Image (spheres, rainbow, N blue to C red):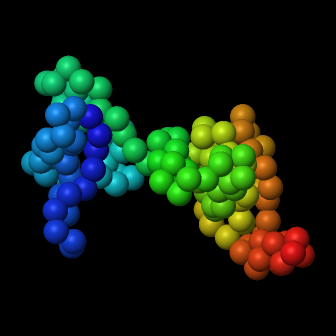
Amino acid sequence: MKLLRYGPKGQEKPGLLDGDGNIRDLSAHVDDIAAETLSPSGLAPLAALEAATGVKPTTIGKPGPILYQQALALLGIDPNATIAIGDRLDTDILGAVRTGIRSLMVLTGVSSKDDIAGLDYQPTWIMQDLRAVTKALTQLQ
């Protein structure tokens, strides 16, 4: 089973894609499949679904590796030739680490260099901002 959003653009609803390819409407249980939905309070309806169906839902999104793996497969890109660039340690960078790809953290978002100290993972590289990334890439040519 996989969580998804379905419906016409601008009117999407949360859904659950079952093993038979059927979409089950979840709008009576959750407002959306978003970060808030996947918080501890948002996961309570998913626990109820798991108890009712006997099937553990598969969640897709950062920092889980499925999102990254699907992007790599869709684009036909070698993970060893890929770098994930992000500004959040707990989503972008952790997702890259869990996928086994290199990561570059830019210091323009929520996370800072100080936040790395207490973690058991870290980005491969850290740069101040996207200008620094662009400059570094330009120097490689």
- Can the viewer see residue 65 in this picture? yes
* Image quadrant in which you'd find residue 104: bottom right
Query: Residue drawn at (17%, 34%), measured in percent from left and top?
Result: 20
**Taking 139 as reference, is 16 above or below it?**
above
Query: Residue drawn at (14%, 41%), measured in percent from left and top?
Result: 22
**Taking 136 as reference, is 85 above or below it?**
above
Query: Residue drawn at (27%, 50%), measured in percent from left and top?
Result: 4
User: Where is residue 76 drawn, in percent x and y?
Assistant: 56, 53
User: Where is residue 42 drawn, in percent x and y?
Assistant: 29, 43
Left or right? Give the position of 138 relative to 80.
right
**Taking 56 as reference, is 62 above or below it?**
below
Question: Which quadrant is the C terminus positioned in?
Answer: bottom right
Query: Residue drawn at (48%, 54%), measured in percent from left and top?
Result: 74
* Image quadrant in which you'd find residue 135: bottom right
- Can the viewer see residue 111 in this picture? no
| Identity of the residue furthest to the front in this view | 76
Question: Which quadrant is the N terminus positioned in?
Answer: top left
**Taking 91 as reference, is 50 above or below it?**
above
How many marks overall? Answer: 0
Which sits in the foreground, 44 or 78?
78
Which sits in the foreground, 139 or 130?
139
User: Where is residue 2 drawn, in percent x and y?
Assistant: 29, 40
User: Where is residue 24 drawn, in percent x and y?
Assistant: 13, 43
Left or right? Give the position of 82 relative to 57.
right
Left or right? Give the position of 84 relative to 126.
left
Left or right? Give the position of 33 relative to 52.
right
| Identity of the residue furthest to the right in this view | 139
